Amino acid sequence: GQQLNQSPQSMFIQEGEDVSMNCTSSSIFNTWLWYKQDPGEGPVLLIALYKAGELTSNGRLTAQFGITRKDSFLNISASIPSDVGIYFCAGLVNRDDKIIFGKGTRLHILP
Amino acid sequence: DGGITQSPKYLFRKEGQNVTLSCEQNLNHDAMYWYRQDPGQGLRLIYYSQIVNDFQKGDIAEGYSVSREKKESFPLTVTSAQKNPTAFYLCASTSYNEQFFGPGTRLTVL
C-alpha cells in the first residue's frame, strides 16, 4: 500500500534556528497536508497544498508541494519554544480515499 | 463554535470490559474517522465512515466496533477482544480534502 517516509524522525535545534523536514513517497498524491501535534492533544492542520509546485505560508511556516507530486517539504523559520511538538505530513490522492500519514518528526528546542 | 469533541479526555477501565468512546462533530462533515496512536508512534486507522449508516474497516479494526446512526456522531467501542487497548484515540472528520481532529481520548486499561 501507499506509504509516506517522513524525515528526520526527530530534531534537536536551538531557539531561533530554521527547521526543515520532508515527506517522500513512491506514489503520487494530489493533496499534501501538514499537521502539528502538541503532547496529549489532537493534531492541528497547519497547511494544505493542492497543486504541484505550490508554495504556501502560514506565519513562520512554509510548505511546498513537490513538482513530482511524490514529496512535500515544511520549513519553520526562526523557531520559538512553542514550536516544540510532533509534525505530521499526510497525503491524499482523491477526496474519498483514506488519508495516508507519515510517522512524524518530533521537534525539540534546546534551552 | 464549530468543531469535533471527544469525551471523556481520560478513561480508565478494567481488563475485560467493553468501553465506548464518544465523538461528535458540528461541522456538517460527511466522513468521520477513528485513529489509534501509541507512544512515539504515528496514526493508525481503525474505522472510517463516509456516510450515515455505512462504515469500513481500517488497518487495525480487530477488537473494535463502530456505528454511524447520525451524521454528527461516530462512537467507537473498544471490546474485550482488543489485546492491547491502552492508547490515545483520535477522532477526525473530513471536508473536501482536509481532515480535522478532535482533542483525543486517552484510554488506560488496568
Image (cartoon, grey):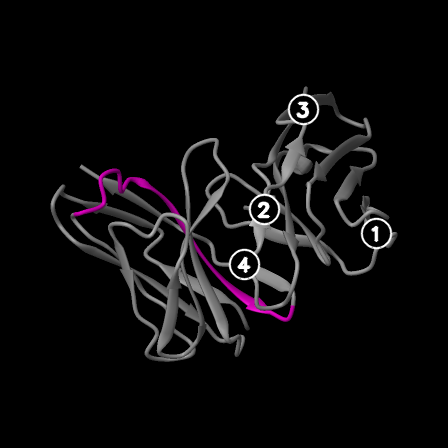
Are the residues under badges 2 and 3 in a single subunit?
A: yes
Same subunit, labels 1 and 3: the answer reads yes
Q: Secondary structure at mark 2?
A: loop
Quadrant of the drawing holding the N terminus of chain B: bottom right
Locate residue B16 relative to residue B88 in the image: left or right. Answer: left
Would you identify the image quadrant in which residue A96 lies? Answer: bottom right
CA separation, marks 3 and 4? 28 Å
Q: Which mark is residue B15?
A: none
A111 relative to B1, above or below: above
Q: Could you tell which of marks 2 and 4 lies nearer the N-terminus? A: 2
Specify the amino acid type for callout 1.
Ser
Give the class, few, some or many, for how many residues have Cα within 10 Å of label 4's Cα (few <14, many ≥20): some
Q: Amino acid at mark 4?
A: Lys
Give the residue number, with chain letter if any, for mark 4: A98
What residue sits 86% from the left and 54% below the top?
A: A54
Q: What is the magenta range?
A: B81-96
Q: Which residue is mark 3?
A: A11
- Distance from disc 4 to disc 1, alpha carbons, whole Å, reads 25 Å
The residues bearing labels 1 and 3 have C-alpha atoms spaced at a distance of: 21 Å
Residue flagged by tag 3: what amino acid is it? Met
Indicate the secondary structure of the residue bearing disc 3.
strand
Instruction: Name the residue carrying label 1.
Output: A57
Few, some or many C-alpha atoms within 10 Å of disc 3 (few <14, some 14-19, many ≥20)? some
In front of the other: B30 or A29 = A29
10 Å crowding of disc 1: few (<14), some (14-19), many (20+): some
* Chain for disc number 4: A
